[in-house]
Image (cartoon, rainbow, N blue to C red):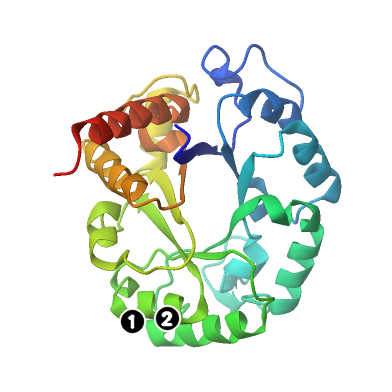
Amino acid sequence: MDAIRFGSCSWNYDSWVGLVYSKPFATAAEYLREYSRKYRSAEIDSWFYRLPDRRDVGAYLAAVDPDFRFTCKVSQDICLSHHRAAKGSTALEPNPGFLSVGLFRDYVSRIDAMLPRIDAIMLEFEYLNRDKMPSQGAFLDRLADFAAKVEKGLPVAIEVRNAPWLDERYFAFLREYGLIHVWSEKRYLPPVVDLHARFGAGQPGPLVLRLLGADRAEIEAKTGGEWNAIVDPKPERARIAAMLAVAVRENAKVIVNVNNHYEGSAPLTIAALEAEVAHALAAGPG
């Protein structure tokens, strides 16, 4: 579907052979070449765990056509507020790199060749309890200082896991600083359809939707690590499709990235969503 860029949260899975791939490949870039014939967007999840390597950036760009787009996650050294004091310890120590503008600039410099093709540079925050962040206000103060110093015009996107923080104050803050909200369908967060109905109007940037799912261990047990079947169908998916159809009618730019953990197989979820959005569009408004 041209109106929505569907893709997945990472892509190099041998169990997608037959669904996406003709055979297993040796590298992520080789997988991406064949993946990009089927999808128009991909989320680079691996950069959350390590800083980008310019060789990977070049290989990814070489693997896709000029119309292909990316979203990417900023490394955890920037997004984690605290570290464990020691292995096995429950004590926490503040992370000096948390929302570091210097680290973020280093990250961006490593992906500069890809920047024209990126729809969202995502800062994915964990759930921040009071031991890590005393309040929403304290978090927004730190984020304001960060946003005021980073280069303007970058598609910086924010994903928070504290459900009570997703209120008018938070969304007004994003509008003020031109930050994109990441609409995340995930356990312990409000349904994205309900949240978007309340706060979606006037938000900066594209509609970036991540379908992540609930209990990862539970669905991994159901799939056995083979991501080629839907094992946990979500009733909410039909409402999400209807929301996306409205966005298409309103000519919004939409990026949907699906995790295998959402229903058991990102490619099959994407296929189902595409069909449901097409059906909703054919049915017309109402």
Residue drawn at (61%, 81%), measured in percent from left and top? 146
Residue 270 falls left or right of residue 234: right
**Contact, mark 1 vs mark 2 (Cβ under 8 Å):** yes
Give the secondary structure at mark 2.
helix
Of 225 and 181, nearer the camera is: 181
Residue drawn at (63%, 76%), measured in percent from left and top? 95
Residue 85 quadrant? bottom right
Residue 46 in percent (x, y) is at 66, 46
Residue drawn at (62%, 44%), measured in percent from left and top? 69
Give the secondary structure at mark 1.
helix
In the picture shown, does residue 174 fall above or below 270? Answer: below
Residue 162 falls left or right of residue 139: left
Marks 1 and 2, how far apart at CA: 6 Å
Q: Which residue is mark 2?
A: 173
Q: Which residue is mark 1?
A: 169
Observer able to see residue 258:
no
Observer able to see residue 120:
yes
Of 85 and 72, nearer the camera is: 72
